[in-house]
Image (cartoon, rainbow, N blue to C red):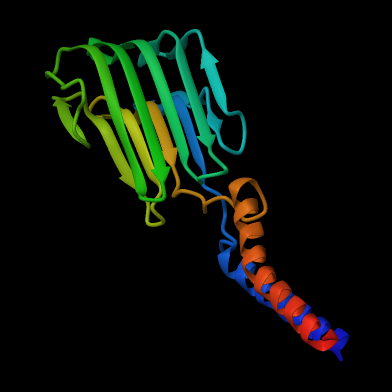
Amino acid sequence: MYKRWLRRACATGVIAATVLLAGATPAVAAPGDASAFVASARVALLGQVTTAVSPLAPSSTSGAASAQLANTAVPGVATAGLVTTSANRDDDTGVVSARSSLTDVAVLLSNMGTIGAITVSCEATQSGVTGKTSLADVALKAATVPLEPPANTTIGVPNVASLVFNEHVRAADGTLTINGIHLRLNALVGEGDLVLGSATCGVAAPPMPMASGSGLWAGIGLLALVALPVGVTAIRRRRVDTA
């Protein structure tokens, strides 16, 4: 009789532990994604595409985690010196981040001016997704721009273009894209877009699964909470049965 009771008690403990662990395991969800690049452009003059540049020095959490170029050029539009990007995901916390950095930037179009450095970054935590753009040594003819421009700071260059600094583009699913500078050509000059420095972060991934790291210890703890009372009860019952 004791053996039959012990089997029932153990089965109950296993079922309870399984329910606890299943309830504590995060729901299945795609992990957080992040990506970055230093420049992209598509420019058309008089209806003809004169410049088409795919994202340069791309990095992402699903591919190359970092990239670097010694020199970068968007022909006839802009140049830059050393540029770097990076994208990271912390599988323990679910936090994702991305960063794009450009140095010695010159906007050649209409000789607009120079910028010593552009740094664009974003980060997604369990609290939300944020991002910013930082500038250094700005010397533009069109206007004075803060080194930490507020989101979507826009200046216009009459009959040439508009420039958006620290552009924030948020998608319906919570993904946030930060563009350091987004230049849009005026139709009188031509049509097209130039982006210098871009970082994109999706929402944070779920926290670490129960099967690894501290999650494993938490799972062991849950098992112990269930198994210990069952074991103690079994020992007491055995003593009673053998007395």
Q: Nearer the viewer, residue 89 or 60?
A: 89
Q: Nearer the viewer, residue 110 or 39?
A: 39
Q: Quadrant of residue 101?
A: top left
Q: What is the quadrant of the C terminus in the image?
A: bottom right
Q: Is 34 on the left or on the right of 161, as rendered? A: right
Q: Position of residue 4 (x, y in %)?
A: 86, 88
Q: Is 110 on the left or on the right of 74, as rendered? A: left
Q: Is 214 on the left or on the right of 51, as rendered? A: right
Residue at 59%, 56% in the rendered image? 218
Is residue 25 among the parts visible in the rendering?
A: yes
Up/down of 200 relative to 86, above or below: below
Q: How many callouts does the rendering have?
A: 0
Up/down of 107 relative to 181, above or below: above
Up/down of 135 relative to 185, above or below: above
Residue at 57%, 43% in the rendered image? 91
Q: Is 90 on the left or on the right of 179, as rendered? A: right
Residue projecting furthest to the bottom: 1
Q: Nearer the viewer, residue 186 or 231?
A: 231
Is residue 47 among the parts visible in the rendering?
A: no
Q: Position of residue 147 (x, y in %)?
A: 20, 20
Q: Position of residue 226 (x, y in %)?
A: 65, 71
Residue at 22%, 36% in the rendered image? 151
Q: Position of residue 6 (x, y in %)?
A: 81, 82
Q: Quadrant of residue 83?
A: top left
Q: What is the quadrant of the N terminus in the image?
A: bottom right
Residue at 49%, 35% in the rendered image? 35
